[in-house]
Image (spheres, grey):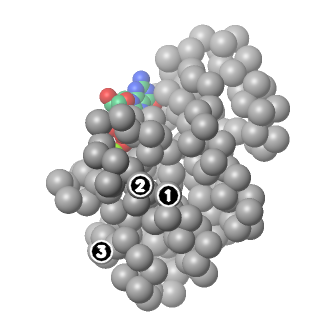
Amino acid sequence: MEVQFIKSATYKDEYPKLRLPRIAFAGRSNVGKSSLINSLLGKKGLARTSSTPGRTQLINFFNIDDRWVFVDLPGYGFAKVPARIRDRWGPMIEEFLREEEDLKLTVMIVDARREPTDLDQLMRQWLEEFDVSYQIVATKADKLSSNQLQGSLSRMETGFKSSVVPYSSATGLGKKDLWRVLERI
Ligand SMILES: Nc1nc2c(ncn2[C@@H]2O[C@H](COP(=O)(O)OP(=O)(O)O)[C@@H](O)[C@H]2O)c(=O)[nH]1
Ligand SMILES: [Mg+2]
């Protein structure tokens, strides 16, 4: 799979103009977003590029095989980040979800072991409000027993009123299912 970094952006004017369907990835910092993207693509380049200093708080766009644009949205819920940057996160994500016309799907990543946070709920609220299709993915599933995982998934599906795909970047669980969702677009 050919993965090419296009650019980083903050505002709509800076988004790349390439007419390809966008698939965005969102989630709290440390949730496992980079690992999930690496695991999906079977390579490390994309996530490493996104974590380059100066890019972690920006929206990063990647050309995947001239077929999709993957959009790595900045992680949220980080305590250590200065308020100035935290305050920018909301408007930046909100504008992207509202204005990006080629956005076909947002993969919203949560931790299979944790209760969704307020910011997870806010993100889901925006996705609903701006009518963006989304797929919730519960990653780090390998850290739970299969009973615990079943319990966690059914609690999340009730809470989010949406289907949740279990995922593990460590074992590859869910990779096929998530690709199936992307291929449907
Ligand atoms: N066991 C396990 N660990 C994971 C998984 N995904 C991520 N991690 C670990 O969680 C930490 C944060 O992952 P990272 O992908 O950098 O999170 P990001 O901040 O959301 O990009 C790292 O130590 C990863 O190795 C997973 O599916 N299973
Ligand atoms: Mg990351």
Residue at the image point whose x is 38% and y is 38% from the top: 78
Q: Quadrant of ligand 2?
A: top left
Visible in this render: residue 170?
no
Dots 2, 3 in contact, CB < 8 A? no
x%, y% of residue 58? 33, 62
Mark 3 or mark 2, which is nearer the start of the sequence? 3
134 with respect to 31 (left or right): right
Mark 1 or mark 3, which is nearer the start of the sequence? 3
* Residues packed near mark 2 inside 10 Å, few (<14), some (14 to 19) or many (20 plus): few
Residue holding disc 2 = 87
x%, y% of residue 116? 62, 32
Residue holding disc 3 = 7
Residue at the image point whose x is 56% and y is 15% from the top: 144
Give above or below for 72 relative to 22.
Answer: above
| Discs 1/2, front | 2
Q: CA distance from mark 3 to mark 1?
A: 20 Å
Give above or below for 8 relative to 15.
Answer: above
Q: CA distance from mark 2 to mark 3?
A: 22 Å
Q: Is mark 2 within 8 Å of ligand 1?
A: no
Q: CA distance from mark 1 to mark 2?
A: 6 Å
Residue at the image point whose x is 41% and y is 55% from the top: 87
Residue holding disc 1 = 90
| Discs 2/3, front | 2
- The amino acid type found where label 2 is placed reads Asp
Residue at the image point whose x is 73% and y is 17% from the top: 151
Dots 1, 2 in contact, CB < 8 A? yes
Specify the quadrant of the image occupied by residue 34.
top left
x%, y% of residue 25? 50, 55
Extreme-left residue of the structure: 53
- The amino acid type found where label 1 is placed reads Gly
Give above or below for 149 relative to 171.
Answer: above
